[in-house]
């Protein structure tokens, strides 16, 4: 277990001095896992004393996509994280869940430590992949696919050396790493029991994921001792109707002498001295009963057999109607137009029909795209989101199609596969497609027609397979008529167009408010004060769901302990002015471009002041990229 082994402080201090001088320490001086990670970091061009260590946090919309993509993991992990935090509360620490890209998607902990952790971006939305944060428990556990402890000076970046972190990968029943569970604390408060605690918690999540995915399958519970069945240490194996092992937890694989690559390839009869027919028969006659068996390595095992739901005969009666419960159903909160859009999206999910989402900025097009992906057959594969308006025009081609090594000045030495190739097998979401330059529209059309990508700078064509969802706040049909968007690309994208209604036209406004309040202040039972609710109902909400979320998040932060109603004093001052001065809206009730531009400029000014002129921080608060903010600032000059 080299990745968990510590080393003497004197040796680490010497190794640290060598690293800071740009030299790797000799073999054996420090933990081999840490040494290998340092080597990867130096190879990636990272510097220990970089003042700009790490990538910018992802936007709220991208974080929402990441949460939706790992929905099952988050649901099973949250109660376990609460348990973990209860064991460490008051010790100056935090519990973290990151996805399989190293992006922190959930975090909770002691307020004083959270404040210090925030200074090094150890918070939701930040990427702790090794490429961005150097050697650290989350990124290194992801790189090694194994539990890792990174203590104090073992962190690559100088600014992170106050931390001591313990992380374990959370592996799904199909053998794929779904995310990373981590406990982080000040290095002076590191406890040696953290490793066992985090590992146990990781096993709890994995077993719950197994049960959720294979609840209806024929399942085997394994252990070398009878009393071990039903405990956290038991092995779990799911079988297909033909006896194929289609899922297993780590203990199950170890007891059968298998590895992750055997899932879906090995039949149970090749790993256990029980015939499939006997397993099925025993499961029907004595569900939950125990038998003994011998593993492929000769080890004696006790086996409890749980039949699948279809294995026990049931009366031949029609099944009662059950409404579909999936990621799309979460968006159906009572509005007729949204319900119709959800129903149509569900019918085409998984079919080779491209989707085009239209609607004003902030209506939730990104969330809707994420829900379509999560409700379809590609949900276990990545959804890759590209905001065509947030990329500099000269970078869109390289970002989308990838590039060969040395294709242009500043290109990575090993090139880049591009976002389209990263979406292979999953879903490609092209947001604000209406802002894509005409020259690149032609190339995108060719990719969609031929389903092959050629990187910038040349190379072999690579076949790609993905579901396509595009979105734009611009009416693309009008853009085509004006000559600003290619007609042939529009018809290629327009397999099914779904128009998402603006917030002011939705009939489920109060439901949305209640959901958001519960999200920002769970179990607090918050409501709107009656006069505020009346003002909200007549406001036009030019920023739609995004504006509503920002207002309610701000209000929840201003509530005092014991307060359970959002009043005027809890709302942003500029927003109160808008609520109380409806006369500023243009005649006829329509909000003009000039009005929206002025409101947008005012918001940018306030965020720049609040961020002390830090453009990256202002962009993060606004939920846009730095490039978009640069363009907006330059456009006002």
Image (tube, grey):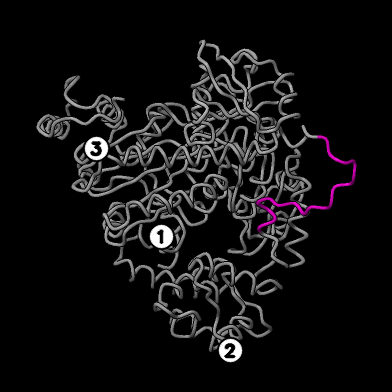
Task: Out of 264 and 327, give the one closest to the viewer.
Answer: 264
Left or right side of 268 for 8: left
Q: Which residue is mark 3?
A: 156
Q: Which mark is residue 619?
A: 1
Above or below, comparing residue 594 to residue 323 in the picture: below
Q: Magenta stretch containing residue 618, yes or no?
A: no
Q: CA distance from mark 1 to mark 2?
A: 30 Å
- Image coordinates of residue 181 in percent, x first then y, are 41, 42
Secondary structure at numbered mark 2: helix
Q: Is residue 159 visible?
A: no
Residue 442, given in percent of the width and then of the height, sits at 64, 40
Q: Which residue is rendered at x = 36% and y = 37% of the image?
A: 139
Tell me: residue 491, above or below residue 453: below
Question: Nearer the N terminus, badge 3 or badge 2?
Answer: 3
The numbered disc on residue 583 is 2
Residue range corresponding to the magenta coloring: 313-330
Q: Nearer the viewer, residue 64 or 208?
A: 208
Q: Quick check: marks 1 and 3 in contact, CB under 8 Å? A: no
Can you give x and y, in whole percent of width and height, for residue 339 in the image?
Answer: 75, 61
Q: Residues within 10 Å of mark 3 (few under 14, many from 20)?
A: many
Is disc 1 surrounded by few (<14), some (14 to 19) or many (20+) residues within 10 Å? many
Tell me the quadrant of the picture where the N terminus can be found.
top left
Residue 324 lies within the magenta run: yes
Q: Judge from the rendering whether residue 578 lies leftward or rightward of residue 357; answer left or right.
A: left
């Amino acid at each position: 277990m080299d990745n968990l082994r510590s080393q003497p402080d004197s040796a680490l201090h010497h190794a640290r001095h060598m690293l800071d001088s740009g030299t790797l320490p000799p073999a054996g001086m420090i933990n081999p896992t840490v040494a290998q990670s340092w080597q990867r970091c130096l190879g990636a061009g990272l510097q220990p004393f970089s003042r700009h260590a790490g990538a910018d946090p992802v936007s709220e919309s991208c974080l929402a996509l990441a949460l939706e993509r790992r929905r099952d993991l988050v649901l099973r992990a949250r109660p376990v994280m609460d348990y973990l935090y209860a064991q460490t509360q008051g010790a100056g620490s935090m519990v973290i869940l990151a996805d399989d890209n190293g992006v922190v998607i959930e975090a909770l902990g002691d307020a004083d430590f959270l404040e210090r952790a925030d200074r090094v971006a150890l918070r939701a939305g930040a990427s702790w992949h090794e490429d961005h944060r150097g050697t650290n428990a989350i990124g290194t556990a992801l790189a090694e696919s194994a539990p890792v402890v990174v203590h104090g000076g073992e962190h690559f970046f100088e600014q992170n050396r106050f931390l001591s972190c313990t992380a374990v990968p959370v592996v799904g029943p199909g053998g794929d790493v779904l995310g990373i569970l981590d406990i982080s604390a000040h290095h002076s408060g590191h406890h040696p029991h953290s490793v066992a605690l985090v590992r146990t918690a990781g096993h709890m999540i994995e077993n719950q994921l197994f049960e959720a995915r294979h609840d209806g399958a024929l399942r085997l519970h394994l252990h070398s001792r009878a009393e071990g069945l039903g405990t956290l240490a038991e092995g779990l194996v799911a079988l297909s109707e033909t006896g194929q092992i289609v899922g297993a937890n780590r203990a199950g694989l170890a007891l059968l002498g298998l590895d992750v690559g055997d899932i879906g390839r090995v039949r149970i009869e090749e790993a256990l001295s029980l015939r499939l027919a006997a397993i099925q028969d025993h499961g029907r006659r004595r569900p939950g009963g125990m038998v003994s068996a011998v593993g492929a390595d000769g080890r004696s095992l006790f086996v409890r057999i749980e039949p699948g739901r279809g294995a026990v005969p049931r009366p031949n009666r029609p099944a009662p109607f059950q409404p579909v419960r999936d990621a799309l159903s979460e968006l159906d909160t009572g509005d007729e137009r949204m319900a119709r859009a959800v129903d149509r999206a569900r019918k085409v999910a998984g079919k080779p029909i491209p989707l085009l989402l239209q609607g004003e900025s902030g209506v939730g097009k990104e969330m809707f795209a994420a829900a379509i992906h999560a409700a379809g057959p590609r949900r276990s594969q990545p959804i890759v989101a590209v905001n065509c308006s947030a990329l500099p025009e000269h970078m869109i081609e390289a970002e989308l199609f990838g590039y060969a090594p040395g294709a242009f000045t500043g290109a990575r030495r090993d090139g880049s596969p591009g976002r389209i190739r990263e979406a292979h097998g999953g879903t490609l979401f092209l947001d604000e497609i209406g802002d894509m330059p005409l020259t690149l529209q032609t190339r995108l059309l060719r990719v969609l027609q031929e389903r092959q990508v050629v990187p910038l700078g040349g190379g072999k064509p690579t076949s790609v397979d993905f579901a396509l969802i595009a979105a734009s706040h611009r009416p693309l049909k009008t853009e085509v008529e004006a000559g600003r968007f290619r007609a042939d690309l529009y018809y290629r994208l327009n397999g099914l167009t779904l128009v998402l209604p603006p917030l002011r036209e939705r009939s489920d406004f109060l439901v949305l408010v209640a959901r958001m309040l519960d999200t920002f202040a769970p179990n607090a039972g918050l409501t709107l004060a009656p006069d505020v609710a009346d003002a909200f109902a007549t406001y036009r909400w030019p920023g739609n769901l995004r504006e509503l979320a920002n207002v309610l998040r701000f209000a929840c932060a201003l509530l005092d302990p014991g307060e359970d109603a959002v009043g005027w004093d809890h709302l942003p001052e500029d927003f109160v002015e808008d609520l109380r001065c409806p006369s500023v809206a243009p005649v006829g009730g329509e909000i003009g471009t000039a009005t929206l531009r002025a409101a947008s400029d005012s918001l940018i000014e306030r965020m720049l002041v609040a961020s002390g002129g830090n453009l990256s921080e202002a962009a993060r608060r606004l939920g846009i990229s730095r490039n978009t903010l640069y363009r907006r600032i330059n456009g006002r000059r």
